[in-house]
Image (spheres, rainbow, N blue to C red):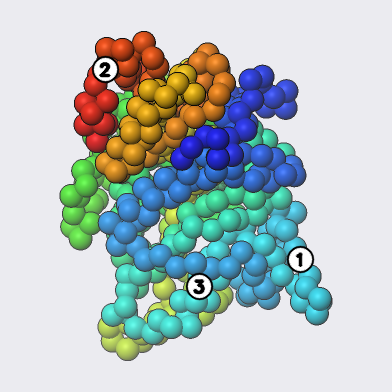
Amino acid sequence: MRLTHYLLPTLKENPAEAQIASHRLMLRAGLIRQEAAGIYAWLPLGLRLLRNIERIVREEMERAGAVELLMPTLQLADLWRESGRYDAYGPEMLRIRDRHERELLYGPTNEEMVTEIFRGYVRSWRSLPLNLYQFQWKFRDEQRPRFGVMRGREFLMKDAYSFDLDEAGARRSYRRMFVAYLRMFARMGVRAIPMRAETGPIGGDLSHEFLVLAQTGESAVFCDRAVLDLPVPAADVDYAGDLAPLVAAWTAPYAATEDVHDAGRFEREVPAQRRLLARGIEVGQIFYFGTKYSLPMEATVSGVDGVELPVHGGCYGVGVSRLVGAIIEASHDGHGIVWPDAVAPFQAGLLNLKPGDARVDAACESLYAGLRAAGIGVLLDDTDERPGAKFARMDLIGLPWQLLVGPRGLDGGMVELKHRASGERRELAPEAAIAFLR
Ligand code: ATP
Ligand code: MG
Ligand code: MG
Ligand code: MG
């Protein structure tokens, strides 16, 4: 991309309405624009973040055997009457009427709809286990939308739903998701700690929230520091095998959110020097809820002996849009965002420090073409602004690498490569810079 033909409305000043670093930086780096309270447009650079996070989540969901579909944002109220949740859900639900006075709602979650789809097609235990997931916008009319995309009203969620013949099967499905979550967050460059959690209005008896530690997190959390040192399962983890020992290792150290925290147990189980009292951002949650939806909605399959059985379900959410904010909370400095490589919207920024200078322009064009040919995502700053403004903007938007091209370096046949996270700089020949970034 060339900055002159891109839309990157960066701000020099901190917007007054933003209280936390990630919200400030997302506005300043031109990632989002507020359209209404808790409702945001994703500008081009921001959208690339969403897509990168989505890609990692998708890869890990597929690895764990889940199957992607896409359900609509609008749902019929009658569907929610089947489960009894239409009236129970309260003012967080956005209720809508169409021109025929039919009652609809903008989905805050999709258990009912996915159960309706499941019961329409799946008849036999032979089709199980089945895990269906989607990336879709949700709407929750939050009482206090705040912190930008962290608590939006419209937000992007990955939501998955598992179907199994019995509780033992459902717990295996739950463990597959537990492991997939460990992997996906680690790949995004953040440490999300699984913690025992309350099940809330979705119900059920087994649930973990995954939290990224950050001072600005909305939940108080209590954990054993031992959980910080556990190894994340490798890509070749055997999803067909027994994941119980792995999950047991990750759930052995004490880790709980304030809702379920047991101070007595915490003090008994965790030596004082290992006690971590912190705050966290909930970036995902997994639930086993059994037959909560399959019973009222009559989602049954025929079992091994031909008898109809209600399926056992679980649901698994990831806050894709919230993650953009959570990653920034965990990875920024005084100059701006520092994107982990795996989610960065572009791998490198290419700075033309003297546009109009034929030699510098030609070097930039050749580097730009070479980087693109090598498959490296690159944003070329070809504007005619001062170098200082260009440096500040690149630091602000946080691409992992910056390539600085100016007349002085080119005199010696060199360009400068700067690593955003460490600030380290080195001089390289242009071809060597491409080879390095490849
Ligand atoms: P919270 O406790 O923050 O209100 P939740 O427990 O209500 O979240 P879930 O129903 O577990 O949310 O939804 C799955 C995921 O969706 C959450 O873990 C979170 O990452 C994300 N999420 C939930 N509400 C919002 C929101 N208002 N804005 C952005 N992301 C959200
Ligand atoms: Mg909520
Ligand atoms: Mg919650
Ligand atoms: Mg939750």
Circle 1 is placed at which residue position? 96
Q: For the point 80% across and 79% down, which residue is it?
A: 100
Q: Secondary structure at mark 2?
A: loop
Label number found at residue 115: 3
Quadrant in which the C terminus is drawn: top left
Instruction: Point out residue 426 in the picture as x, y percentages from the top left corner.
Output: 28, 14
Q: For the point 64% across and 25% down, which residue is it?
A: 11
Q: CA distance from mark 3 to mark 2?
A: 63 Å
Instruction: Give the vertical position of 135 relative to 362 (above or below).
Output: below
Q: Earlier in the sequence, mark 1 or mark 3?
A: 1
Q: 5 and 325: which one is in front?
A: 5
Q: Secondary structure at mark 1?
A: strand
Q: Between label 2 and label 1, give the one nearer the viewer.
A: 2
Label number found at residue 413: 2
Q: Between label 1 and label 3, give the one nearer the viewer.
A: 1
Q: What amino acid type should be assigned to the residue bearing mark 1?
A: Ile
Instruction: Point out residue 228 in the picture as x, y percentages from the top left corner.
Output: 32, 28
Q: What amino acid type should be assigned to the residue bearing mark 2?
A: Gly
Q: Residues within 10 Å of mark 2 (few under 14, many from 20)?
A: few
